[in-house]
Image (cartoon, rainbow, N blue to C red):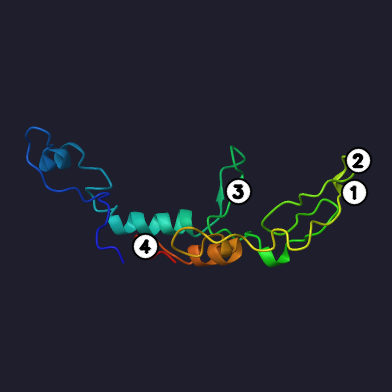
């Protein structure tokens, strides 16, 4: 668990000076701010972001993306991808390299890929499971995390 938290609404108390504001002067000028009335805190902001953004479907009203689920609930299960000829991929990891044949440009005429072509992804050159971990499994692990769970090198 990370020990450092990003400062949001708990600024350090400062005195007026070069490059500093005066905290007490700001409280006097903005005395009706929810921040100074105690209605907003780091914990309330964190709770609101977790509940209103990370834990529910986001809908932008059709402006750009429509709806988006940050929990990746629709992630594909690679073991259920239909493969073969007729325009289907060779495997869940690569397209079918076979040609539909002379005189045809229709993917429905495409034969199955050569035996063993693209059945498993190549090993990742870096630490971790990389391409051998399917989107369904990784999405489930990521969506179960909450703010503060992300630690360099230890994310599930």
Q: Quadrant of residue 82?
A: bottom right
Disc 2 crowd rating (10 Å Cα; few below 14, some 14-19, many 20+) is: few
Quick one: which residue is furthest to the top in this view? 18
Question: Is residue 12 depicted above or below 149 in this figure?
Answer: above
Instruction: Using the numbered discs, state the Cα–Cα distance from disc 1 to disc 4 in whole angstroms.
Output: 47 Å
Q: Quadrant of residue 94?
A: bottom right
**Eye-nearest disc, 1 or 4:** 1
Instruction: Using the numbered discs, state the Cα–Cα distance from disc 4 to disc 3 in whole angstroms.
Output: 31 Å
Q: Which mark is residue 122?
A: none
Which sits earlier in the primary sequence, circle 1 or circle 4?
A: 1
The spot of residue 114 in percent (x, y) is: 79, 58
Instruction: Using the numbered discs, state the Cα–Cα distance from disc 2 to disc 1 in whole angstroms.
Output: 7 Å
Instruction: Using the numbered discs, state the Cα–Cα distance from disc 4 to disc 2 in whole angstroms.
Output: 50 Å
Report the front residue among 73 and 25: 73
The spot of residue 89 in percent (x, y) is: 75, 54
The residue that label 3 is drawn on is: 67
The residue that label 2 is drawn on is: 104
The spot of residue 117 in percent (x, y) is: 73, 59
The residue that label 1 is drawn on is: 109
Which sits earlier in the primary sequence, circle 2 or circle 1?
A: 2
SS of the residue under disc 1:
helix
The spot of residue 52 in percent (x, y) is: 46, 55
SS of the residue under disc 2:
loop
Q: Which mark is residue 153?
A: 4
Quarter of the figure with the N terminus: bottom left
Instruction: Using the numbered discs, state the Cα–Cα distance from disc 3 to disc 2 in whole angstroms.
Output: 39 Å
Residue at (52, 59) in percent of width and height:
124
Circles 1 and 3: CB atoms closer than 8 Å: no
């Amino acid at each position: 668990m990370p020990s450092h938290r990003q400062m949001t609404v708990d600024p350090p108390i400062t005195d007026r000076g070069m490059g500093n504001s005066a905290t007490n002067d700001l409280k006097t000028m903005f005395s009706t701010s929810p921040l100074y009335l105690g209605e907003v805190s780091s914990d309330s902001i964190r709770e609101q972001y977790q509940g209103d953004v990370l834990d529910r479907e986001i809908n932008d009203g059709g402006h750009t993306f429509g709806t988006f689920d940050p929990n990746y609930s629709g992630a594909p299960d690679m073991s259920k991808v239909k493969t073969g000829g007729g325009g289907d991929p060779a495997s869940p990891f690569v397209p079918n390299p076979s040609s539909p044949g002379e005189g045809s440009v229709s993917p429905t005429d495409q034969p199955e890929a050569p035996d063993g072509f693209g059945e498993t992804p190549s090993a990742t050159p870096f630490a971790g499971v990389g391409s051998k971990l399917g989107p369904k499994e990784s999405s489930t692990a990521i969506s179960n995390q909450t703010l503060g769970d992300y630690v360099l090198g230890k994310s599930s």
